[in-house]
Amino acid sequence: MNNYLKALLTGLAIVVPLSTPAIAETLRWSSAGDVISYDPNAQVDSFTQSVQHMVFDPLVRRNKDLKLEPALATSWEVIEPTRWRFKLRQGVKFHEGQSFNADDVVATIQRQIDPGARNRENLSAVVGVEKVDDYTVDLILRGAYPLLLNDLAAIYMMSKPWMEAHDALKPGNTTTGVVTYASNHANGTGPFKLAAYEPDSKSVFAVNEGWWDKPQHNLTEVEFRPIASDATRVAALLSGELDMIAPVPLQDIDRIENTEGLKVAQNPSLREIFLVPSFRPELHAMPGKPNPLLDVKVRQALWHALDMNTIQKRLMRGKSRVSGMLVAPEVTGYDASIDVPLAYDVDKAKALLTEAGYPEGFKVGLGCSNDRYIADEQICLAIASMWAKVGVEVDLSTESKTTYFPRTDKGEFDIYLLGWASLPPMDGYSVLQALLATNDGTFGGSNANGLSNPEIDKLARSAAVELDEPKRIQMLKDAFRITHDQVLYLPLHQQPVAWAMSDKVEIPQFADEYVRPWFAQVK
Amino acid sequence: MIRILSVRLLQAILVMIAVTAIAFIMFRFVGDPVAAMVREGATQAEKDALRATLGLDRPLVMQFVEFLGRVLQGDLGTSYRYQQPVVSLLLTRLPATLELVFVATIMALAAGIPLGVLCALKPKAALSRLTQSLTLVGISMPTFVTGLLLILVFAVNLRWLPSSGRGDLVDLGVWKTGFLTLSGLKSLILPSITLALFQLTLIMRLVRSEMIDVLSSDYIRFAFARGLPRRYIYGRLALRNALMPVVTVTGLQIGQLVAFAIVTETVFQWPGMGLLFTNAVGYPDVPVLSAYLLFVGFLFVVINMIVDILYTFIDPRLRTQ
């Protein structure tokens, strides 16, 4: 009898802890857009990339503080400036059972830098990859390059035997319409397995019990459903069909916060919003006359005339952060002493304009999107009336992002609104290279308004190859200081990221707007 | 007869060529797909390379001739966003839209005909008046408002029905259907009511006026005079004749339903062709936009052609013209 009891108790002791996690904890969340493809090389969309991260692991990843940490690579060293050696994690298995090793990394990197990969520029510094042994890989770089780890955090490791078995070693191609098996299926090493994928309907993820990392979540399943209409997405949360929506429309925040059982989490995101002045000889609004924006005093006057606190309180409902530079505090190269906006001062703005020779003001065109950034159209309307107070007449044009951005690229606006998140590298060099450097070759890809500053160009080119981190950061800061002092751009604010969720859900929010369910707890 | 048919066919072909040209020209102006496709921080060289691979750097006329050539071969291009041939993309979305349109049509007929008869027979009854004024509201309210109101009442407040999506589907090979699961059927209700409402109003009003017309005709009066049972007169004699135009209009309205489905599908995240279209507008996914316009144009041309031909068969006077 006693033995029976003992056996029974022992049995219970084994069964009970095993049976507890069997209760299904599902996180059902929704966003406005859907995953475009599960092929990590087929797109450049950062939302798609964020969802793919549930299935795939990179060699290095971002931790809860968005700092880089080892993932599938455990350590790395720079052997020569053009050769980085990575030690790989052992004992990692893909979802379908294949073991992870150097062959997978070689195949993945080759797929990534294949001329047919849509996002090959996300790893543009790498020209080759060599296997050293089963768990050591060398990446060969074009030249010295400081941001390799930042880039690698967005490169997801795929299984070579799996790609071979499904004829997916080459990435899909948009022009020829090549769809590979990897477009609709995913086999990674990540915390969740892709169990079902129906475009525009849902993606279902099952938990990966064999994940190499210690799970910090208690989920057994994640269901992602895209809902494009803001009102429907909010309704689905209110009706209890969803546990979380990201993002939540700003106008619905109050209503959701006042609903029992729901809460809203909001923080400034990485995305900075700013105005881009024209540095060309003439303005479109005043043909045949010299461009007043070329005078730094005029640019300072325009900044002094911006009442950003009112915009922050009224239009952004107190959720944005007024800023003075083009990168957020989380981004490398940020400097609090530079991040100081020029004070709102109408008299000073008028005085500066008079000094510059425009006592009566002038006419200028302002371009704005109306469906890309939070309250973008309203912000521009507000700015137009603020500038009118100092005598600057604004010819405002607002339009959809689909026609707006091609026009900004062609330089069709005298001043235009732009947002920048410095993603994926999350490094100030992104701004330096794309926005501040003169438009020329691989530099200034989004500098479409004629800005050209030799000092900044020099800094951009030296920061691109500087491996000494403190030195490199100083170069970024120097460039940002020039930008601020010369008012090369007019920073407005950091826009917020807002998620709404059931109060049963605990999930950290990130400034890069990635939803990371592997940190989620559902009660 | 053959001459009439061939003229009609020629007209249809001309209309389709015009639609193709409009589709092509119009969507060159909805925006630059390159801007949506490149990553943040892309260099000018990257953008130019993408533009070249998409064939957007060549003269417009060349692009149109090639576009026309490919359309004639049944190749509508590759979606920029989904990276799939547009034809197969449309075909995977077709079942969702067709099921929605089908259920909405059934609903509109099932409710519209009896209500129309009721309003014709008892125009002064309270129920008839209520129906008349309610359908007036129904016809003048924008589809998305109707949809959101239904969501608010039945999904958010009562929690009876899901607010979006198609629910669980059963895969029958080429056709994924929501008809065979409970959640699939529940998901159908709100979007089909939204889509059916306009149809319902139209059918109700048409049946009512036709019915009033028929009831005042001589043969009905004779039927009453002969003492035939009321049910027989209303049901067999009057309604049958009143339904002829209803059938025609319902047929023609299927094209309208597909068009209205764009709004309904967006509100309810219904993964059909309409949702594909709205998502394509924002991207902008030009091949999908062009293909959708061609598809809808084709649908209308075919329906109109069939109706015209049927009319010539039914009414001999049209043949002699």
Image (cartoon, coloured by chain):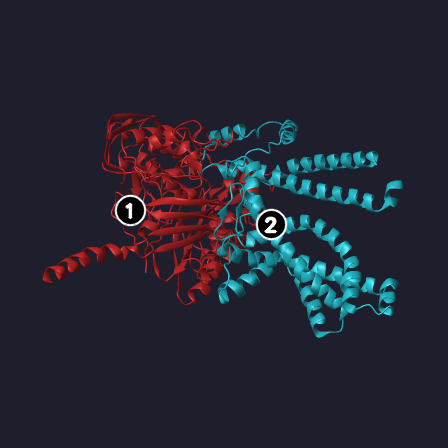
Chain colours: A red, B cyan
Q: CA distance from mark 1 to mark 2?
A: 41 Å
**Residue occupying the point 48% across, 61% down:** A252
Q: Quadrant of residue A49?
A: top left
Report the front residue among A282 and B236: B236
Q: Residue furthest left?
A: A2
Instruction: Indicate the chain on which mark 2 is placed.
Output: B
- Quick one: SS at disc 1? loop
- The residue carrying pointer 1 sits among few (fewer than 14), some (14 to 19) or many (20 or more) residues within 10 Å by Cα, namely few
Q: Is residue B97 above or below residue A128?
A: below
Task: Check if mark 1's residue and mark 2's residue have beta carbons within 8 Å.
Answer: no
Kind of residue indicated by mark 1:
Glu
* Residue named by callout 2: B262
Q: Is residue A293 left or right of residue A137?
A: right
Q: Which residue is mark 1?
A: A209
Q: Amino acid at mark 2?
A: Ile
The percent coordinates of residue A377 (x first, y second) are 54, 52
Residue B17 shows in this picture: yes
The answer to whether any part of residue A246 appears in the image is: no
Position above or below: A176 against B309: above
